[in-house]
Image (cartoon, helix red, strand yellow):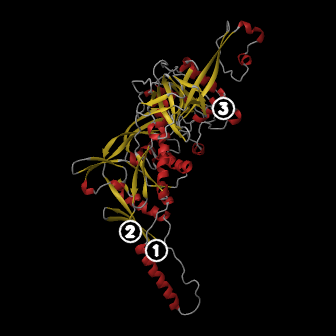
Amino acid sequence: MTELKNIRNFAILAHIDHGKSTLADRLLELTGAVEKRKMREQYLDQMDLEREKGITIKLQPVRMAYKMQNVNIPGLAKRSGAGKNQNDNEKLKINPAERDTKILNFDFYTLNLIDTPGHVDFSYEVSRSLAAVEGAILLVDATKGVQAQTLANLYLAKEQNLKIIPAINKIDLPGARVKEAEEQIREILGDSNAEIYKISAKEGKGVEELLQAVIQKIPAPQVNINQPLRALIFDSVYDAYKGVLAYVRIVDGQIKAGEKIFLIGSHAQSEVLEVGIFKPALTQRNELGAGDIGYIATGFKDVSLCRVGDTITNFHHQARNPLAGYKEPRPMVFASFYPSADAEYDHLKDSLNKLKLNDAALVFEPESSEALGRGFKCGFLGMLHLEIISERLKREYGLDLIVTTPSVAYQIIEKSGHKEKTIYSAEEMPDPSRLEQIKEPWIKLEIICPNVYLGAIMKLVQSSGGVYKNTQYLGSERFIFSCEAPLREIIVDFYDRLKSVSSGYASMSYEILEWRSADLVKMDVLVAGDKESSLSRIVPRERVFQEGRALVSKLKEVLPKQMFAVSLQAALGGKIIARETIAAMRKDVTGYLYGGDYSRKRKLLEKQKRGKKKMKSIGKIKIPQNVFLEILKK
């Protein structure tokens, strides 16, 4: 077992696409954690979805071994370097004939790295990672400078009192602006003398020096191996043979396979089937000790018994105090998932339970709809989170889903009894005559962008109902624009519009503030005279006509034609505010006739007309899944 003083636990923090996964690749190569023949780009991004989108979605731990040599030579400065697979004498330029006059000291370090996501929707993954480490590398792209999520992740790290090691990446690119990036980093750190490392993760330049800085500057874990076991669960996955695999940071004590454990939060108990580490593949070990990051095969088949943030202790020598755990995430974007076939309902339920084990920010509960049958109302941290979960359900569990229009949560106060209630969709909204007040969530929004786009950003925020707060300049060319805005305006297409008005240079992050009163109404959608509850939405009163026209126009484009004319209507209460009609599909019933009396054709046309009229009176429209998806893209 590695000595505690030689253990380093750290994470890599960065905005999306700043080279975080590439840096992790170089560290794996440098320490020999992965064989060269098995190495590939974005090695720690294990899901195909991550590799396709080029983003990290799930935190991924890995253990690396690094040999650092300290050389004491009279009259020469102390040097250090890696030597695991290199010629040490050549590396340090030591003459073998003089070797006896030198003193060589070798230290072996165990490095536990947690690679974290960079998108705002997965900030909960970052916060859980930071609770398991003592330090972090703050990575900034030299061509883009400090971005919004760089700042947000730095705040999370400071809350945990972690040691921050700043580094500038992509210094080899022609557009690199290293000096400007240095100024920005020093400004956000509040330290004009901060040592900032310059690296090229792609070329490997400066990576070894950065790794040595991790060893020298990040403190070893402060733990007590003689105390009863306390292990913090920071993530988990489900294995068909071993049950729930809890990813843990051992804070106190130690654990071996065969020992009986107790979960302080859920009061569950079990016998450990296996313990091990991440290489990054699961690798079995005899034991895990204080300071280690690894996994415990709990044997639990019920995924609800092993929750992220719970504390594992020894059943016979239980710790008195649980670890602090995590602040519960607050999902504020909601959509409903329905299986395309009723028989798939139980499969969907089981799949969501297993996904929740791997993604603690996902929440769901059963619901039913007259049009779509039985399904689940799900809560997400943002639109990308929703997209990733729906895609994982399709790929990993083979589900064919119908996803309803996303919305945020609202608080309503009814006139009778003044009871406050939270609703998650337009279907739950009561009659306006019963409502006293509606509240919606507001957010604090931070946008980082070059100065030239300040006017365009302010105009965009104003058109989205935002309230300006302040502007802080970051160096001479960039600014941090702070404002407050309703969440409903941000979740759907605000980010796309922000990128459009800033030529792709702007970045944003947000956090939930509070509930505020708003003048909102429920807009219903009628398809062929029937109310389609899954398309209903809550919109501001002053924009209800604009939203209604846009929605029925989009529906007309994407809804397939029928054998009869289909009316599409948007309604506010009992009043129709917008209408479109999908023309009936035409079929030439007289095509096979030729010559003869026109009354023969007339008779067939009249018969067709009566048939269409009958179909219109009794016909039902089943909206295909792709229509809901197209509406989401609107």
Q: Are marks 2 and 3 in contact (CB under 8 Å)?
A: no
For marks 1 and 3, give the one nearer the viewer: 3
Dot 3, how many residues are within 10 Å of its Cα: few (below 14), some (14-19), or many (20+)? some
Looking at the image, is 213 positioned above or below residue 356? above
Quadrant of the frame with the N terminus: top right
- Compare marks 1 and 2 and give the one earlier in the sequence: 2
Amino acid at circle 3: Val
User: Gap between marks 1 and 2, in whole Å?
Assistant: 13 Å
Left or right, residue 362 beside residue 294: left
In-front residue for pair 225/561: 225
Query: For residue 501, which numbered disc appears in the image?
Result: none
Amino acid at circle 1: Phe
Q: Determine whether the residue tagged by mark 1 lies in a helix, strand or loop.
A: loop
Q: Determine whether the residue tagged by mark 3 lies in a helix, strand or loop.
A: loop
| Residue 180 visible, this orientation | no
**Residue 436: percent from left, percent from top:** 24, 51
> Which residue lies at the image location 41% right of the left edge and 73% below the top edge?
618
Residue under pointer 2: 529
- Compare marks 1 and 3 and give the one earlier in the sequence: 3
Looking at the image, is 520 positioned above or below residue 9? below
Residue under pointer 1: 564
Q: Residue furthest bottom?
A: 597
In-front residue for pair 296/91: 296
> Which residue lies at the image location 54% right of the left edge and 20% below the top edge?
217
Residue under pointer 3: 34
Left or right, residue 173 beside residue 556: right
User: Gap between marks 1 and 3, in whole Å?
Assistant: 63 Å
